Image (cartoon, helix red, strand yellow):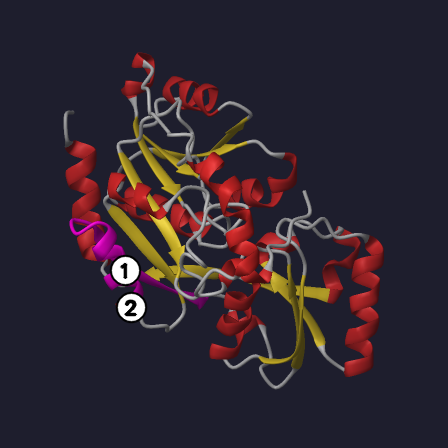
Amino acid sequence: MKFKKPKFWDYKKPNLLAYILFPLSKIIDSKKIIKKEISELKNIKKICIGNIYIGGTGKTSLAIEIKNILTSMNYKCCFIKKSYEDQIDEQKLLSKNGDSISNKSRIDAVKEAIKQNYQVAIFDDGLQDSDIKYDISFICFNKKNFVGNGFVIPAGPLRQSLRSLKDYKYYFLNGNDESINENSKILKNLNEFCEIFDSKYSITNKEDFDLDDNFIAFSGIGNHSTFIETLRKNNFNVLKDIEFPDHYQYSENDIKKMIQLSSKLNAKLLTTEKDYFRINKIFDFQIKYVKTKLNITEINNLKKLLMFELEKNV
């Protein structure tokens, strides 16, 4: 699916079009998510890395960091990702960073994880899945876009209403150096008992690049602007940036046009690791990608939280 979100979704206040679409949003939001646990799925701990904002909140990056933390704590864990044809990039990125189970049914994926004796299953997405009751849910937000105009699809970018946040305790604000004070205050007003974690993207393969070069940066991810800000924060000279829809499948013609532009501007082509998985390998030598990771500010508190939640009712 080639989807590029409307700009008005990220306005700080709803505009006229948002209000016109609001009745449709109310219909969508009226569908209450009621979790029902299947007894045989209780033999494994389940962590959901989810969101209520439609995309670009850092779920996959956080799932990888949670897995790294749990591995260091000697838990045998795996990723679970529902299989979608247009999200092969995320499946490949997860598999590159650990054991991963992908299935059209999350329930079947959990059953497979239990068969393989995993102690913890980390779900990349799935917060809105009513068939699985998670032991821990982390709700991800992008610091910059946060909740957009605050409305549910199609009037805004939310998959469920802000009121639903009272059902969840742990939130992550992912991004760069933006202050989280204002967003934290809003979240605390919605749920005074919530715990909020701050995290920042860093580039782990910066040494692979000559920062005297000029770059054309492109991506088809949920939050292109955060990617560009991460590059500039790390002193990449981005002459031009090109945004494609989320999970965009690049054609050879798309890549050839960008190669021509890079030659004209005497600049190197640069993209994200997720995008790189969607590019024909014949162009490998002409495109580079940056590897990023999330640095969690309160990582020791997160470790204690994970230990506490995972050891409950054991």
Amino acid type assigned to the residue bearing label 2 in the image: Glu
Say which residue label 2 marks: 182
Q: Label 1: which residue?
A: 186
Say left or right for 63 vs 226: left
Residue at 80% across, 69% down: 259
Q: Position of residue 151 (x, y in %)?
A: 45, 51
Determine if residue 71 is in view: no
The percent coordinates of residue 303 (x first, y second) are 21, 49
Residue at the location (27% across, 57% down)? 197
- Are the residues flagged by discs 1 and 2 in contact, CB closer than 8 Å? yes
Q: Residue at position x 55%, y 46% from top? A: 154
Q: Quarter of the image holding residue 237?
A: bottom right
What secondary structure is marked by label 1? helix
Which disc number belongs to residue 83? none
Q: Position of residue 118 (x, y in %)?
A: 35, 27
Residue stretch rendered in magenta on the structure: 183-203
Secondary element at tag 2? helix
Residue 238 picture location, percent across and down? 62, 79
Q: Is residue 224 left or right of residue 85?
A: left
Q: Is residue 244 magenta?
A: no
Q: Nearer the viewer, residue 141 or 95?
A: 141
Find the residue positioned furthest to the bottom.
Answer: 212
Q: Nearer the viewer, residue 253 or 51?
A: 51
180 or 291, nearer to the observer:
180
